[in-house]
Each structure stands twice: as C-alpha cells, then as structure tokens.
Image (cartoon, helix red, strand yellow):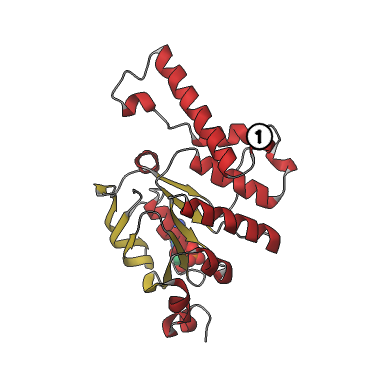
Amino acid sequence: MTGRLDVHDLRVWFGGVKAVDGISLTVSPGKVHGVVGPNGSGKTTLVNAVSGVQPLTGGRLELDGADLTGSPAHVVSRAGIARTFQSIKLIPTLTVRENVLLGADGLTPDAAAGRDVFGRAARRRAATAAARSADEALERLEIAHLADRAPDELSYGTRRRIEIARALAARPTLLLLDEPLAGMSRGERAEVAGVIRRLGDEGLTLFVVEHDLRTLLGICDHLFVMNFGRLIAEGPPRETAAGPEVQEAYLGR
Ligand code: ADP
C-alpha cells in the first residue's frame, strides 16, 4: 500500500509569524487522518506546504521514501499527492465531467512507461487514460449521472463532490482535503463524510483538515491536533480529542 508521507521538522515562517514551526509526523498508508486546531494554528499552511503550493522555510518531506522537499506543486502532484481547497474552485462554463477531466490532465501513461510522449498515438493514449480516470472518479463520487450538467446548477454538497472527483482523477496515492465539510448543511456533511470514509476503506490515504470535530471523529483513524504552528497531540481520535491539551487549546476549556 502506498501514500505514506513523512514530514520532518517542517517550518513555514512568514516574517515573524511561525505558521508552521517544526512539525514532524507520519501519515500511514490506507488510513484516514484528521487534522484539527484553532483558527490560525497552521493547518492550511501545512497542507499548502505538503502540496508544494507554499515554499518551505525548512524541514523535509518524503512520499513513500521519495524526497519531495522543495518540489513545486506540479511535481508533487505527479508524485501522487492531490488536494482540494477550502473554497470550491470549479469552472462554471465547463460541465461536471470536463471539470473532473482537468484533474486527469497530468496523467501521462507513456511517460511512465518510458515511451515517446509527443506522437499522435501517445496523445490519443493519454486522452483515453484521462477520460477513463475521470469516469472512474465520477462513479466513485456517485455523480456520474450529473456528468453533463453545469456545476452552478448543483447543490453545494454536490459541488464539493465534484472537487473531490477532480482531485481523484489524478489517481493520487495521498489525498489532502482542506475543510471539505465547510459551509454545508448537516445532511450534506453526513454525505460527504460518508464518501471520505469509503475512500479510506478502499485503500486511499487521506489527510483531512476539518473544523467539524464531531463529524471528523466519526470517520478518521488517527487524529492530529495543532496549535500555534505545532503538533500538540496525536493518536486514536476519541482518546486524543478528550486529552487535556486538546480540551484546553481547541475547545478553550
Ligand atoms: P489555520 O488553517 O489553522 O486557520 P493558517 O495556516 O491559515 O491557519 O495560518 C497560520 C498563521 O499563518 C496565521 O497566523 C496566519 O495569519 C498566518 N499566515 C498564513 N498565510 C500567510 C501568508 N501568506 N502571509 C502571512 N501570514 C500568513
């Protein structure tokens, strides 16, 4: 099983603000990891740093033993890490399927097999692989029947599924979700939480930043708790959430 991420002494400083300040953690293959912490504790910065969107001040990142330290986002994505953003970023003039296809853009089966990637046949194979991957992602998120619709006609929860499908179309081994349940009704939260749990059960490694602690506890196998750019606790979700550091930092008790 793949998707193991090793983060060692990761630092991201913005001038005097130490947004991420010496985080070391391991994300285990095939498990759903939850990340919680108060506002401003560095969760999004951590996701940005791991996905190559945010340059590092220091530290090391490895995916399945391959060094990704300092790699830009497109290299990180080809290595097998995909992500979604806090705010939904779908293109309104494209259909659901076309939006999901964008996620499969970087799939280059010929490059992976060491073949010529510039010929017409290679382009056709790449397009076929991308289409297959997009269709599979639509099926996994149970939105295949909406493939030809425009995203704006659909509910917020469904648009969130489209985003997750687009990330899955890249065939990642590790999927980072930044607040996937934000702004949803209770029903939509339960639905998307169910999708996340199922992806974990199917063997995908997930790293989920989420405010809704109660829902997160119901779906994750391992919980990380951050405060002031540091990891203050981790372990089995319920025990970790009930610990004194977490009660004080996260819930203000
Ligand atoms: P969280 O996701 O836990 O709410 P963030 O990672 O967004 O926390 O922010 C952590 C800290 O870093 C905050 O103090 C925030 O203001 C600061 N920060 C985040 N991004 C930047 C940036 N681009 N420039 C300066 N400060 C930033």
Residue drawn 66% across and 34% down?
147
Left or right: 196, with 24 as reference point: right
Residue 204 higher or lower than 247, as above or below: above
Left or right: 4, with 130 as reference point: left
Q: In which quarter of the image is residue 213?
A: bottom right
Most extreme residue toward the front is 201
Mark 1: few, some, or many residues within 10 Å (few <14, many ≥20)? some
Left or right: 44, with 234 as reference point: right
Left or right: 100, with 27 as reference point: right
Q: Nearer the viewer, residue 17 or 82?
A: 82
Residue drawn 37% across and 65% down?
20
Residue 176's x, y, as percent? Answer: 46, 53
Q: Can residue 183 be seen in this view?
A: no
Residue 125 higher or lower than 22, as above or below: above
Residue 207's x, y, as percent? Answer: 44, 57
Residue 136's x, y, as percent? Answer: 53, 36
Residue 117 higher or lower than 248, as above or below: above
Most extreme residue toward the top is 120
Q: Is mark 1 on a helix, strand or loop?
A: loop
Residue drawn 61% across and 55% down?
192
Q: Quadrant of residue 148?
A: top right
* Count of marks placed on residues: 1
Disc 1 Cβ-to-ligand 1 distance below 8 Å: no
Amino acid beneath label 1? Ala
Q: Nearer the viewer, residue 28 or 97?
A: 28
| Circle 1 residue | 147
Q: Is residue 3 visible?
A: yes
Residue 184's x, y, as percent? Answer: 67, 59
